[in-house]
Image (spheres, coloured by chain):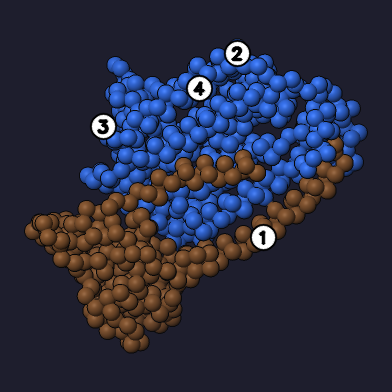
Amino acid sequence: MFKRLLIVAVASVLTGPVFAAGGNVELLKRDWSFSGPFGTFDKAALQRGFQTYREVCSSCHSLKRIAFRNFADLGYNENEIKALAAEYEVQDGPNDDGDMFMRAGIPADHIPSPYPNDNAARAGNNGALPPDLSLIAKARPNGPDYLYSLLVSYKEAPAGTTVPEGMYYNPAYPGHMIAMPQPLYGDDVTFADGADASIKAVSADLVQFLMWTAEPKLETRKRIGVAAVFFLSIFVIFAYLAKRRVWEDVH
Amino acid sequence: MSAEKFQNPVVRWIDHRLPIFSMLDHEKYDYPVPKNLNYMWNFGVLAGLSLAIMIVTGIVLAMSYTAHVDYAFDSVERIMRDVNHGWMIRYIHMNTASFFFIVVYIHIFRGLYYGSYKAPRELLWMLGVVIFLLMMATAFMGYVLPWGQMSFWGATVITNLFSAIPVVGDSIVTLLWGGFSVDNPTLNRFFSLHYLMPFVISGVVVLHIIALHRFGSNNPIGIDASGPQDTISFHPYYTIKDMVGIAVFLLLLAVAVFFFPNAMGHPDNYIPANPLQTPAHIVPEWYFLPFYAILRAVPDKLGGVLLMFGAIAVLFILPWLDRSPVRSARFRPVFRIFFWLFLIDAVALGYLGGKPAEGVYVTLSRIATGWYFAHFLLILPLLSHFETTKPLPKSISEPVLSASGRAA
């Protein structure tokens, strides 16, 4: 037993430093509906998060790994998805004359990016590249808490700290100087369902949406996981009982 | 002679011409195994199972993966999003890689504790070290394939190590890269080799098992079986005991895959590789951290590389460093203390490998590295001479019988 515990201790110490690769950031912890073994997404929150992405973030940040067809996960039906896609202009081609042309989006299209390439994105943002947001919630340590903290932690730099031109002070960002201006102030978005549009509520919904874009199979994964763990727990019990039975006559 | 054993006429017909059934039968029923093996002896089978899971999931992943710097990251994300159950196959592959190392590390430390490397099992042990080396190469190249930030920078750092070799170092690095930096040719050859290596490992595993079956398993007492009263057949006794271990292994693996799939990875690897932007800390996968700590403990690059490979090379000659005739630590009171100290040292090295190479961490890394080598090169040879071991039991049955009074 002691050895078994030791093994667990060894494994956790070994993996410890992997988690600890953060930086001097002040994180606000939140209870997310999608954490824990039975965690799920809140579809209404995902829809609100998408609206915020569309009305605020999408002017600089792409979301290129998400196609309109994926929005079925958010609770939209086929017609709604077709209508949503059609609101976007997508470049297609070349046509029979060899020209590229613009057309209305279809569900199979990915969300168009705000800039044609990284250089254009840098040119439009003081030399800083706004990262694609598709995977951002998995690409940062403590992703959801970090993103939430980042969105709500903008404030005046403390006395004695000089913030360079084109930078902003944010204690949740590693190094505290971030090139992204404060994106949300509260009441930036008006939700059709009349939901709270305070900066905290909007940020939380947006983070949930970004967790979905990073890990769209999260709900399926956890659902299968619960079944797998249940099944394997029973397998462990029966394997152990069978072992006891077989070994009865060995001394 | 063997043909009479089988009832089924088809089996009998085949076995007469191609005795595979006799062979399996022989390994299953006639192979005598000491009857006192504890659950630490499950880990060989678990390592084999891990290898099988890796090969099966890997082959499926390769069907949807594109080994090109412009498409690799996207193809992995496509597996995660659009391939049916692709996310599950990839998470199983990712997490089984870590579990494979956990299992193999326990397997190695079990061998160290019970003296499984001693005569006549030296070659068995050395083949195991070969498998461990091949595993490390395979895991390293596999980690490069998703072409995230840690893939790219990890590959850059590790391949650069070879440039420390005098005279030919730079040429070796160019050869590994297939050019003058980590780039598309590197990714292509790593993919090719990553696909090849598991089958090389499988081959060495066969040799490992042949060597094992020559003298059979060591056991917690470390003395040879003196007769049939000390052994039982592999089937059904150890097949069922292994099944318990397999069930627990799969349960823990499922918990990792379905609830903490990225806990043993690094978030930076969800950022596409960018040769122009170095991550704040480049850390290898957790299972390399002890060796990474040894590498960085030495101020000289060549010295660090030599010591890192030396840390594994020393395992090859272990059977000749520890010359004590007593195998099991149960009868070696002083060795047992040093075993646990060595385990703590190895864990400490793993911890230090994940920390930035600065301040007190450097000093601690050096102490831990010194202890690692002192354990093998000083302590074990000295112990072989000076340690007073406890008296060994006469046979395996004797302590098993006396132990059955206690709750086993």
| Residue A58 % position (x, y) | 24, 70
In percent of the image, x 78 and y 47: which residue is there?
A243
B269 or B187: nearer the viewer:
B269
| Chain B: drawing colour | blue
- Residue drawn at x 79%, y 40% is B406
Of callouts 4 and 3, which one flags the residue occurring earlier in the amino acid sequence?
Answer: 3
Whether marks 4 and 3 lie on the same chain: yes
Q: Earlier in the sequence, mark 2 or mark 3?
A: 3
Q: Position of residue A15 (x, y in %)?
A: 45, 45
Chain at tag 1:
A
Task: Name the residue at the left extreme.
Answer: A165
Percent across and percent down for residue B286 are 44, 41
Tag 4, which chain? Answer: B
Q: Residue B180 shows which numbered tag?
A: 3
* Residue type marked 2: Phe
Q: Quadrant of residue B214?
A: top right
**Image vertical order of residue B71 relative to residue B178, above or below:** below
- Kindly identify which residue carries mark 2: B386
User: Tag on residue A231?
Assistant: 1
Q: Amino acid at mark 1?
A: Phe
Q: How many marks?
A: 4
- Identify residue for label 4: B375
Q: Give the alpha-carbon distance from disc 3 to disc 1, as whole Å.
A: 51 Å
Mark 2, other Cα within 10 Å: few <14 / some 14–19 / many ≥20: few
**Amino acid residing under circle 3:** Phe
Q: Nearer the viewer, mark 3 or mark 1?
A: 1
